[in-house]
Image (cartoon, helix red, strand yellow):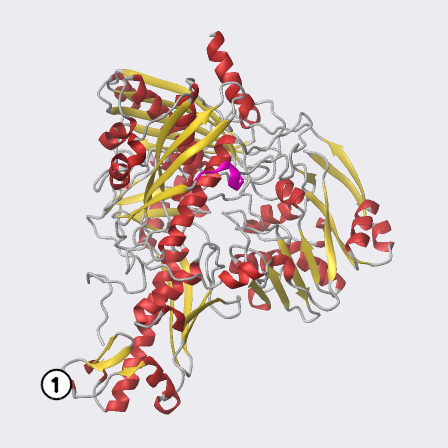
Amino acid sequence: MVEVLLWGSLAESAEGQRKVAVEAATLRELLDGLGERFPGLRPELERGVSVSIDGRVYNDSWFTPIRPDSEVVLLKRLKGG
Amino acid sequence: MALDDTKKARVFKVVGTRPDRPDGIDKVTGRARFGADMVAPGMLTGRVLRSPHAHARIVRIDTSKAEALAGVKAVVTRADFGAVPDHVADILDNCMAGDKALYDGHAVAAVAASSAAVARKALKLIEVEYEVLPHVTDVDAAMQPGAPVLHEGRQQETVPEGLSPNVIARSEFGHGDIEAGLKQADRVIERTYRTAATHQGYIEPHACLATMSSDGQGDLWVCTQGHYMVRNTCAAILGIEQGQLRVTASEIGGGFGGKTTVFLEPVALMLARKSGRPVKMVMSRSEVLRATGPTSSTSIDVKIGMTKDGKITAGFAELRYQGGAYPGSPVDMGAMSGFAPYDLENVKTVGWDVVTNRPKAAAYRAPGAPMAAFAIESAIDEAAKGFGLDPLEVRLMNGADEGTKSSYGPTYPAIGLKATLEAAKSHPHWTAPLGENQGRGVACGFWFNFGGDTCVSLNITPDGTVTVSEGNPDIGGSRASMTMMAAEELGIPYDQVRTIIADTGALGQNDVTDGSRVTFAVGLATIKAAQAAKQEMCRRAAMVWGIDEEAVEWENGAARPAGPNAGKFPPMTIKEIAAVASNTGGPIAGHHEVMAEGAGVSFATHMVDVEVDPDTGATKILRYTVFQDAGKAVHPSYVEGQFQGGAVQGIGWALNEEYIYGEDGILQNAGFLDYRIPVASDLPMIDTVILEIPNPGHPYGVRGVGETSIVPPLAAIANAVSAAAGVRMTQLPMSPPRVLAAIQGKATA
């Protein structure tokens, strides 16, 4: 299981939980797992998110491995100028 | 040949030096070709008819008289575009209005004609019947329940019930308990700050030249930050396959985020399709200001609690950003970045994305972050000074470090914030004396930095020189940086490598030149492409020598036997290997394609001295120093240029620049005479200090540097002006009338 920290307003869509546990070994499994377990998160996931894994931010690499003890933070989709 | 690029302590030979820029001669002699410089046989001139109203329903458009005018070859309205995929629907609507004109300057029709004069005459012959609607341009007014509504049904599920449909989204970030933190404070600063919309101010207007042949293939020459984005977006809007549209990026006269979307390009292609002729379109400065993307104007509440010894016990900010006529202001980025420089137990930010009758906001260098930093860094400054504390020491005491849980969630790896603060503290600027009516300000800033889809192809020519093909327009010196990294990796001189920007037909997908991503991501791909070429050259040398390729290594631009057991052969240089490439298997190249992740965040501290004229309210920048972490500075002169450019744009944002709308919702200052960006005579030399805390996610330790430098200036200058004027400034720009009014208000208070 991987523990995922959700940003504040997402917690309301995840039964009020700021931290949720998801069975996932990759980024794709993580995002799929979150959407399945918390349907309220799906609109935000579909709009696009970024994920910080151990302090490094990932956007699209589905098969980025996630260790069970990794720090995982779901972020708003990051974009620059 | 074994390659390990991540663990070695590297001594650089080319990276870190300051060679001449490869585009220098072209730029100073006028040979460089920008967006408006391309011509084609039979080319037509395209022009756009724009709404004179801030908000109006388009009842009817009659183009018949324009179409009948001699010399007019095509007229386009929204009716010419079919249904488009959702992800480009707002983009198309911004390029060509549908049912409603949503802001002053919104495109409603376009013509292609044999000359500019005919095109202008044709625009006057297009009859548009408008039903003028109430409008709103202020972010706070747009959030009110009774405000004029731009769109129905666009509100996200994140917005509580009862708010105006103009409120598109709400987001919240942070951790801890704000109220508990505030109770621990000896002093709480609570203020509202406002910033004006500002434009990126790039000198080159938008321009393109489009052709669409009868077989459906198109070509586009365009000034853009991302020609692959232009290809993909235009193909979706025009309903053609991406492979049928080839886009070539011109040289670019500035972008700063403002050229990360399309405005003219789909219209030019549609005019070309309808007319069967090449169509060139060039915006005027007025069009650039009225109809391209400035940044958001904002309204921000901040509450900060601090103990008397300077510890920040709680930080709260509520940020309201209007993003113009369509959803997507950068408020999330502001809400995530504002407190990012600090290690806080209790921190919370709330962001509101709001639409108004203004042009759609585009990215502007660290989009969303400078405004948040202005508000938060101003409040920290005020709290620190209220206790008579040194504002640098307070920032050091509360500064984030490796292991800090950031305000937006992740725990930081090694970061450089405190290094910038320590460098500022020990710099002579910090202790230099100040005179009457002068003040000094400091502020910190943070930016995320990005990677993204990237392709590089590196080709060894028959004479052993090297061509690097990359897919990102050179907006900040990337050709020099890629050339240097390729030369470094190959062990050859800088002048033996040339980097070109390839068109969309030559490489796979490349993300836009934004997010400070290019030196990081394209640099990474360039290094990997060079490594692939080295590996192949070692293999060729091994063939020539008749030894195993694992017994060959690359050093100083040549293949060499890896040790005494490999055999005694003189090194084969890159030129010698290239000369026999046809005999050893054919041309030699290396390439690398990657979704680059792992861009390292970056921090900066800015220090500025100002003098405020108490009689006029005018502010003069006396001295300015930038301290920023660059990871590894590949070409330090370009890094310094990025630092200086960010500071200068911040000076304009802080002191003068603003979109001014009349009661009628019409932009009042759509030109550089009335929209005043800084000029050389406004500025001192911007001093720079480069810190190098390597990014572990890049082989050379590179971090992005292009955006962080615009994050602190608004706050640093506000803190300096407030000190000089003796009154806290909470609204930008701090133009002379506003500062004078604040001084006079203080005198009468």
Segment colored magenta: B679-684
Identify whether B649 is placed above or below B457. above
Is B683 magenta? The answer is yes
Residue bearing mark 1: B565
Name which quarter of the figure residue B431 lies in.
top left
Q: Nearer the viewer, residue B727 or A18?
A: B727
Quarter that holds the N terminus of chain B: bottom left
| Residue B333 can be seen, yes or no | yes
Name which quarter of the figure residue B82 lies in.
bottom right
- Left or right: B244 as drawn, with respect to B711: right
Identify whether A50 is placed above or below B342. below
Chain ID at mark 1: B
**In the image, what residue occupies the spot 60% across and 44% down?**
B292
From the top left corner, tell me how far across and down residue B662 is, in percent.
66, 27
Is B184 magenta? The answer is no
- Residue furthest out toward the left: B565
**In the image, what residue occupies the spot 31% across and 53% down?**
B598
- Left or right: B82 as drawn, with respect to B685: right
- Left or right: A59 as drawn, with respect to B160: left
From the top left corner, tell me how far across and down residue B411 is, in percent.
25, 42
